[in-house]
Image: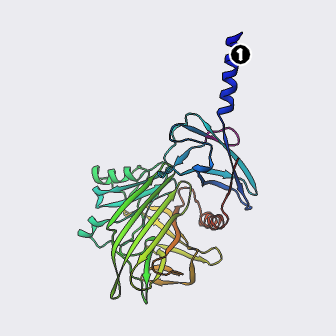
Amino acid sequence: MKNSILFLSILLFASCTAKSTKIIVENSLDFDRKKEIVEVPVSDLNADFAHKTYVLKGAKGEEVGYQLLSDNQTLIFQATVPANSSVTYTLKEGKPAPVAARAHVRFVPERSDDISWENDLMAYRMYGPALMKTEHPSNGVDIWMKYKDEPVADSLYAGELQRNHSYHEDNGLGGLDCYDVNHTLGAGGVAPYTTQLWIGNAFDRYKIVESGPLRSVFTLYYDSIPVADRYFTEVLTITCDAGSPLCKAMVQYGGDTSVQLATGIFMDRDSVNTIIHTENKIMAYTKNATSKKGVPQGQTYIGVYAPAMTGQPFIENGNYAILNNYKTGEELTYYFGAGWSKWKFPTEHDWLAALACFSQAKQNPLKITIQ
């Protein structure tokens, strides 16, 4: 009898101490928010990640993958919340299942110091110092179309460098490169502007802060950017989230005088359409995609969401750009990214709708309540 009472007491004690935390995510907009990354301060959770493990579950009891950021202060996960409603997620002790990688970043010294990153929608790269020895690369953004949720860039690099499988063709490795950057803004780059665009060169240094599975963050440092007869420094931090059509860019220029900043898109060969939507602060561009061997590859879509955009866009040397309200020494935040008609965005209409929803979502963040 005593043993039974003791056993019951242990069960009651365990049930009282194994507390769970409810995370209520509310969507105030009239469209569904699908797989959108939300951030929750760890200090708001009834959790001790230093000594215990936890499982996050959705409203139907399904397990939801999450990422604890490297500062150990923030937990992120992808929330899906129908229009004008809320969904409750529950965090409790347990052993979580591995989270499939949907965001990734890597420094690629074997390919002239590229920095390569991607999510489940698109892959990107920017050029590093080693390439300056053989080419004149810019600080523009290159894009690689992909057709797999998981990371593919490493396979594409390996195919190019080890097996003579050019990543400018579809060799079954998960994607291909159909976009030329040259010395331009590429797919959402930034540059100082006076009476002309002053497009920079390759980055000098880098720092990787996060590398998935749901968010990648890295910083690029540019030590000397010529603008007329002056020089500036640039610090660019890029965040790439799983499920997001656009990456976040936070840029800061340093110098002894003020300078305007332009963001934009290089209109590569086979251009189809350019769009500016001033209310949503969006620039968009569509081009026909063709491999180096001339094989049609559908259409590529590029977009920039620039909350600080001002005035009307202009075209210079193939760059479709717009100025932003900016003061040297401050930080400018904008967003850039791309999509593909063969993966997730069948038509230009689908891409433009995604950009419009993205703009509205950024202006109306999901509301988080902890109980």
Q: Main secondary structure of the magenta part?
A: loop
Residue furthest out toward the left = 133
Where is residue 241 drawn, in percent x and y?
Answer: 53, 56
For the N terminus, which image quadrant? top right
- Please name whichever residue, 60 or 161, is drawn nearer the observer in this view of the structure: 60
Element on which disc 1 rests: helix
- Please name whichever residue, 239 or 330, is drawn nearer the observer in this view of the structure: 330
Q: Is residue 124 visible?
A: no
Residue type for callout 1: Ile
Residue 299 painted magenta:
no
Q: Residue at x 71, y 49 (%)?
A: 87
- Please name whichever residue, 284 or 139, is drawn nearer the observer in this view of the structure: 139
Residue segment shown in magenta? 56-63
Residue furthest out toward the top = 1
Where is residue 314 drawn, in percent x and y?
Answer: 51, 84
Tell me the quarter of the picture where residue 83 sits.
bottom right
